[in-house]
Image (tube, rainbow, N blue to C red):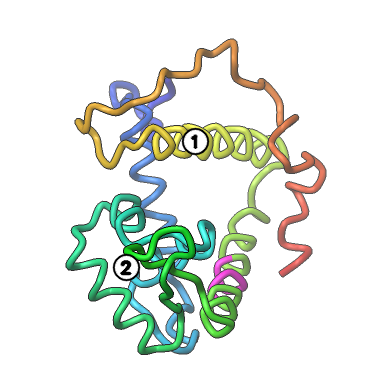
């Protein structure tokens, strides 16, 4: 693995580099989001993203995906419902469960956040070489799949005991094929901003 900061002897586990990049992305993706209305907390944004991706999710599953306790998730959803960002309704299959769905206002807010994020991230990607962008897409696609596998296995956090079998290097695609993004498209992300 290459050195973390370009100096010999600073090699790090891939998770250390990934955390450093994730922290930088958090700052980058939060830029300009004060302009989005209504303003929501990072916890509310994460919850709304999960609810949108898994429409009809129940409170217990949302809590597991967020790594939060049921009372905290209930209060979080109370606030988001009062803001008009999501609705809660009784499950059609189980009268005891509550299903969560984003409202039109919640979807519009997510669209606004995504437009801001796309603009900020595109500015950075425009400075990268096409080959680096393609490698980034391949790596992020693998990371997304591994995270999806972890959630599907029911794991909440490291040490939970529920971890899926790792994917071997032979199972990984060495190119951007199968990532859902054409390599030529990857170099034009800012064209849509």
Q: Quadrant of the N terminus?
A: top left
Q: Is residue 20 above or below residue 127?
A: above
Q: Is residue 18 above or below residue 85?
A: above
Q: Determine if the magenta segment contains residue 151.
A: no
Q: Which is more N-terminal, label 1 or label 2?
A: 2
Q: Is residue 106 above or below residue 1?
A: below
Q: Which mark is residue 88?
A: none
User: Is label 2 in a helix, a strand or a loop?
Assistant: helix
User: Is label 1 in a helix, a strand or a loop?
Assistant: helix
Which residue is at a point 29% across and 27% down the rendered structure image?
10
Q: Quadrant of the C terminus?
A: bottom right
Give the residue number, with chain letter if any, for mark 1: 143
Give the residue number, with chain letter if any, for mark 2: 43
Q: Farthest residue in the top direction?
A: 170
Q: Say few, some or many: other residues with alpha carbon within 10 Å of mark 1 (under 14 / 14 to 19 / 20 or more).
A: few
Q: Which secondary structure type mostly characterizes the magenta part of the structure?
A: helix
Distance between mark 2 and mark 1 Cα atoms: 22 Å
**In this image, 9 relative to 180: left or right?**
left
Expressed as whole percent of the image width and height from the top left, the position of residue 164 reads 39, 24
In-front residue for pair 123/55: 55
Q: In this picture, which residue range is highlighted in magenta? A: 113-117
In-front residue for pair 77/172: 77
Which residue is at a point 40% across and 85% down the rendered structure image?
39
Expressed as whole percent of the image width and height from the top left, the position of residue 175 reads 71, 25
Front label number (2 vs 1): 2
């Amino acid at each position: 693995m290459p050195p973390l900061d370009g100096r010999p002897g600073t090699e790090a586990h891939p998770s250390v580099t990934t955390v450093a990049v994730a922290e930088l992305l958090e700052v980058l993706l939060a830029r300009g989001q004060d302009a989005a209305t209504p303003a929501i907390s990072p916890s509310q944004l994460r919850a709304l993203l999960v609810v949108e991706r898994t429409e009809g999710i129940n409170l217990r599953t949302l809590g597991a995906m967020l790594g939060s306790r049921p009372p905290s998730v209930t209060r979080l959803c109370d606030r988001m419902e009062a803001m008009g960002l999501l609705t809660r309704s009784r499950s059609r299959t189980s009268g005891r469960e509550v299903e969560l769905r984003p409202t039109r206002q919640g979807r519009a807010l997510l669209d606004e956040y995504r437009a801001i994020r796309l603009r900020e991230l595109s500015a950075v990607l425009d400075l990268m070489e096409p080959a680096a962008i393609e490698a980034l897409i391949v790596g992020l696609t693998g990371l997304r799949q591994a995270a999806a596998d972890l959630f599907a296995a029911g794991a909440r956090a490291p040490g939970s005991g529920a971890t899926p079998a790792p994917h071997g290097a032979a199972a990984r695609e060495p190119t951007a094929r199968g990532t859902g993004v054409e390599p030529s498209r990857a170099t034009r992300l800012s064209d849509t901003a």
